[in-house]
Image: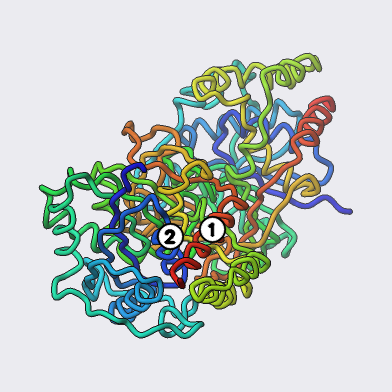
């Protein structure tokens, strides 16, 4: 099978950085470009982080700057989780490449045209860039194969009890994406909360011994420390789940569902409202990923990091 | 014998309300002080008529009064797809052998509370319109309410819409008042009631008990399961009976305490019961959310309840 031409849209971000490192070693993916977006931290920082991480993987992949904030709202961030620079203060070498001269949404459209229906988007931050692209290019939906996102939850939220961060950060953009007509594969908290690595497993990854694996171990220590207050068994690999799913969904379970995003609720702003079985019988515009084989997942992460 | 628990049954019958009342009336633990109707599964005329037919069938002669024709703020929503045109389609039922009291459901509830020496448990199995109106109109009677064991909501998903369960969706403003009341709430939501499945072979166990009430209950289940079978259910989820089981047989249920709020706004989430699962709002829990049920024990409870009506025949 030919590798799938893929753009990653990212607010890098600690788990974004890991997702990009894994994507670089997945033979099923042909990473053609990365677009940055404001999310975990501001867009200047996420752009810088995308450049640094890509160079660290040894890939020669261009980076396009995206939106500095949500489509209609004030920006919110998650620096308290990812550190002020978005990468937990890790000392990655500075990049030598520079960001490209066109905007993320224009780039996404040009690649979609170029690949004529084969392009896959993996969005692991707020969905602002995709929302902008769909608003600007009405012909875009027909040119995309599918969109895999890390975002949302049909059960518990994390930013609020009802909403997950990436969707909550730009709910209108997210609803535009779900209504775009392109199949959206939702790797939300329903599945990513099953995909944790224990502190012991993270140490083992470090022991693989290459610089990328050492970085993997070191960059997550802040989050591990942050998460320890919630009695979680380890760190959830939210964004890597979306990348692994986009490459090979055989270790996952997914079902077709209807999803809309609540953009007005007082308590439920940013909720991915998921119609699993209700009498409303929404049109099935998405696939919700509900299960991952954690053992296979851990093995895959080790295998990919050993390729460095 | 221990003191019986004084209760008010408030419902919108409805097949599962009907079975909940059959269960409550059969329990030696409960002292039913009144029944009230609310609009929900069907119009207030139909749910009231159904309530009186049920009470006549099971020989439950306690004061009864009708609720208001509409939710507090919004327009009524009815569920004929689930319960039929009458709201209680299926077996023939006796005509009511009594009249409703000439006072409103809320006034009757207030009267019961005022006259009771002990705090009363309210078991609402429909929208929370009457209970909210009671709290607004007679705030001084709040200490006379021991707890509210309700069927409504679902902390992860709805049924009428993806986010909202029917009873809460019909009157979210009322539910909001109830959940903010500081009265202890036991929430039999979809989290547990979707597990309270009565399988077709259980219908036969109930039918085989043989008395008139048992036969009617089995036929209600036949009808009620029709809708659910078309949706792929292995049995009929007898939602409302769980709110009664929570009082008379709490040991068969699992629960977790949460601070639960009602979403009253939103394009898609109106009527959602939002549980604060990780302490985001820094509030003490206001509801004991039922999460699991020993299904076999629940079926035994229903069979035992219809068996009670053997003695009624003598």
Q: Are marks 2 and 1 in contact (CB under 8 Å)?
A: yes
x then y, percent, for residue B154: 46, 53
x then y, percent, for residue B173: 26, 59
Question: Is residue B36 found left or right of B55 in the rendered image?
Answer: left
Spatial distance from mark 2 to mark 1, Cα to Cα?
Answer: 8 Å
Question: Is residue B109 found left or right of B185 in the rendered image?
Answer: left
Residue, disc 2: B26
Question: Is residue B237 found left or right of B183 in the rendered image?
Answer: right
Q: Quadrant of the N terminus of chain B?
A: top left
Q: Is residue A64 above or below residue A117?
A: above
Describe the element under mark 2 as helix, strand or loop.
helix
- Would residue A135 be seen by someone viewing this image from the given angle? no
Which residue is pictured at 34% across the width and 43% down the height? A74
Which residue is pictured at 45% across the width and 27% down the height? A79
Which residue is pictured at 61% across the width and 54% down the height? A108
**Disc 2: CA contacts within 10 A as few (<14), some (14-19) or many (>=20):** some
Looking at the rendering, which quadrant does residue B96 occupy?
A: bottom left
Which residue is pictured at 38% across the width and 49% down the height? B29
Q: Is residue B306 above or below residue B276?
A: below
Q: Earlier in the sequence, mark 2 or mark 1?
A: 2
Q: On the same chain: label 2 and label 1?
A: yes
Q: Chain of mark 1?
A: B
- Would residue B158 be seen by someone viewing this image from the given angle? yes
Question: Is residue A247 found left or right of A269 in the rendered image?
Answer: right
Q: Nearest the camera: B202 or A137? A: B202
x then y, percent, for residue A44: 49, 33
Residue, disc 1: B304
Q: Quadrant of the C terminus of chain B?
A: bottom left
Q: Chain of mark 2?
A: B
Kindly identify which numbered label has been placed on residue A80: none
């Amino acid at each position: 099978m030919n590798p799938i031409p893929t753009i990653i849209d990212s607010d890098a971000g600690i788990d974004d950085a890991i997702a990009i490192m894994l994507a670089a070693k997945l033979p099923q993916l042909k990473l053609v470009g990365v677009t940055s977006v404001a999310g975990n931290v501001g867009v200047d920082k996420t752009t810088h982080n995308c450049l640094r991480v890509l160079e660290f993987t040894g890939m020669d992949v261009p980076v396009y700057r995206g939106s500095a904030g949500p489509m209609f709202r004030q920006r919110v961030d998650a620096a308290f989780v990812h550190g002020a620079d978005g990468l937990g203060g890790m000392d990655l070498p500075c990049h030598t490449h520079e960001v490209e001269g066109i905007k993320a949404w224009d780039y996404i459209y040009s690649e979609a045209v170029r690949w004529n229906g084969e392009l896959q988007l993996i969005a692991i931050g707020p969905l602002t860039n995709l929302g902008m692209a769909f608003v600007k290019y009405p012909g875009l939906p027909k040119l995309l194969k599918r969109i895999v996102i890390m975002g949302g939850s049909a059960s518990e939220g994390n930013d609020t009890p009802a909403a997950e961060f990436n969707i909550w950060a730009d709910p209108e953009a997210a609803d535009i994406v779900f209504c775009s007509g392109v199949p959206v594969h939702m790797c939300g908290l329903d599945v990513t909360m099953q995909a944790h690595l224990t502190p012991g497993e993270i140490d083992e990854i470090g022991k693989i011994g290459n610089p990328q694996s050492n970085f993997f171990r070191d960059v997550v220590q802040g989050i591990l420390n942050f998460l320890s207050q919630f009695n979680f068994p380890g760190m959830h690999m939210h964004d890597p789940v979306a990348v692994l799913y986009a490459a090979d969904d055989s270790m996952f379970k997914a079902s077709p569902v209807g999803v809309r995003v609540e953009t007005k609720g007082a308590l439920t702003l940013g909720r991915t409202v998921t119609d699993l079985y209700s009498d409303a019988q929404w049109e099935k515009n998405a696939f919700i990923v509900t299960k991952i084989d954690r053992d296979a997942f851990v093995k895959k992460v080790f295998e990919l990091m050993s390729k460095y | 014998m221990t003191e019986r628990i004084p209760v008010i049954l408030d419902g919108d019958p409805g097949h599962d309300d009907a079975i909940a009342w059959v269960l409550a009336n059969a329990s030696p633990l409960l002292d039913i002080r009144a029944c009230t109707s609310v609009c929900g599964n069907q119009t207030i005329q139909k749910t009231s008529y159904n309530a009186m037919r049920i009470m006549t069938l099971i020989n439950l002669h306690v004061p009864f009064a009708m609720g208001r024709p509409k939710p507090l703020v919004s327009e009524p929503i009815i569920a004929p797809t689930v319960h039929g045109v009458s709201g209680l389609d299926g077996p023939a039922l006796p005509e009511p052998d009594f009249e409703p009291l000439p006072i409103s459901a809320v006034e009757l509830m207030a009267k019961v509370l005022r006259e009771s020496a002990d705090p009363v448990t309210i078991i609402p199995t429909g929208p929370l319109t009457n209970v909210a109106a009671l709290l607004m109109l007679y705030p001084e009677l709040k200490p006379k309410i021991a707890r509210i064991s309700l069927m409504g909501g679902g902390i992860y998903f709805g049924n009428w819409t993806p986010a909202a369960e029917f009873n809460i969706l019909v009157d979210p403003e009322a539910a909001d008042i109830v959940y903010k009341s500081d009265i202890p709430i036991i929430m039999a939501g979809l989290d547990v009631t979707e597990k309270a499945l009565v399988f077709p072979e259980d219908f036969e166990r109930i039918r085989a008990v043989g008395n008139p009430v048992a036969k009617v209950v089995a036929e209600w289940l036949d009808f009620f399961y029709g809708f659910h079978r078309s949706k792929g259910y292995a049995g009929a989820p007898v939602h409302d009976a769980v709110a009664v089981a929570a009082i008379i047989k709490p040991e068969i249920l699992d629960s977790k305490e949460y601070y639960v709020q009602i979403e009253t706004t939103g394009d898609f989430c109106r009527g959602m019961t939002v549980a604060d699962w990780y302490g985001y709002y820094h509030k003490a829990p206001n509801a004991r959310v039922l999460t699991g049920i020993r299904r076999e024990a629940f079926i035994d409870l229903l069979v035992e309840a219809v068996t009670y009506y053997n003695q009624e025949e003598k």
